[in-house]
Amino acid sequence: MSKNVLILSGSPRRGGNSDLLCDQFMKGAAESGNNVEKINVSSKKIGYCLACYYCRDHHGACAIKDDMGEILEKMLAADVIVMASPVYFYSVDAQLKALIDRSVARWLEFRDKEFYYIMTAAEDSADVMDCTLECFRGFARCLEGSVEKGVIYGKGVYEKGEILGHPAMEQAYEMGRNC
């Protein structure tokens, strides 16, 4: 049975290391017959949550009129959500964090999503990714029935394209193929 797979590439560098891992995951998932879409979060207009709770009083509609409403619809329709970010000061980048925060408008509607996380960092240690992973996990923990299915660590990569040939590329492809 095919799944709807949504990949949220948080990298502000199109073709950057975490974005390339997203492409590998997408390739594997598509080859297995899944419906796959990748969103480059940095190319979308996503404002910061204002904590105004307009969404609470307007059935999930946000006071901010930008691309987030469309993205939320796609997230809600997805069976699998892949979240990818380079590590910025031990956490997710601002683009993906804004998306996570803006999900508050409809977070109670999320049910039974499978999550995969992709992270890249210049450091060669997974320890520098702990806070990033906890940010991803914290988001999913708030969504009823969410299940973590896999984590991909792209360690020791900084320059754009350094991930090519890295074992994480094959891991991303295989996770996509088996999602």
Image: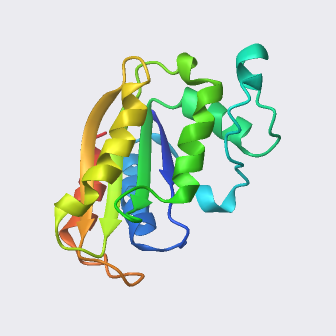
Residue furthest bottom in the image: 159
How many numbered dots are placed on residues in this image? Answer: 0
- Residue 17 x, y percent position in the rendering: 39, 72
Q: Nearer the viewer, residue 23 or 60?
A: 60
Q: Is residue 179 left or right of residue 48?
A: left
- Of the 4 image quadrants, the one containing the N terminus is top left
What residue appears at the point 48 percent right and 48 percent down from the top-left corner?
A: 7
Q: Quadrant of residue 103?
A: top right
Q: Nearer the viewer, residue 123 or 179?
A: 123
* Colour style of the rendered protein structure: rainbow
Q: Quadrant of residue 81?
A: top left
What residue appears at the point 27 percent right and 58 percent down from the top-left corner?
A: 129
**Residue 116 visible to the viewer:** no
- Residue 128 x, y percent position in the rendering: 24, 62
Q: Is residue 6 left or right of residue 152?
A: right
**Residue 19 visible to the viewer:** yes
- Residue 141 x, y percent position in the rendering: 36, 27
Q: Nearer the viewer, residue 170 or 135?
A: 135
What residue appears at the point 83 percent right and 40 percent down from the top-left corner?
A: 65
- Residue 179 x, y percent position in the rendering: 31, 39
In the displayed structure, would residue 40 be above or below residue 123?
above
Q: Is residue 153 left or right of residue 101?
A: left
In the displayed structure, would residue 45 be above or below residue 147?
below
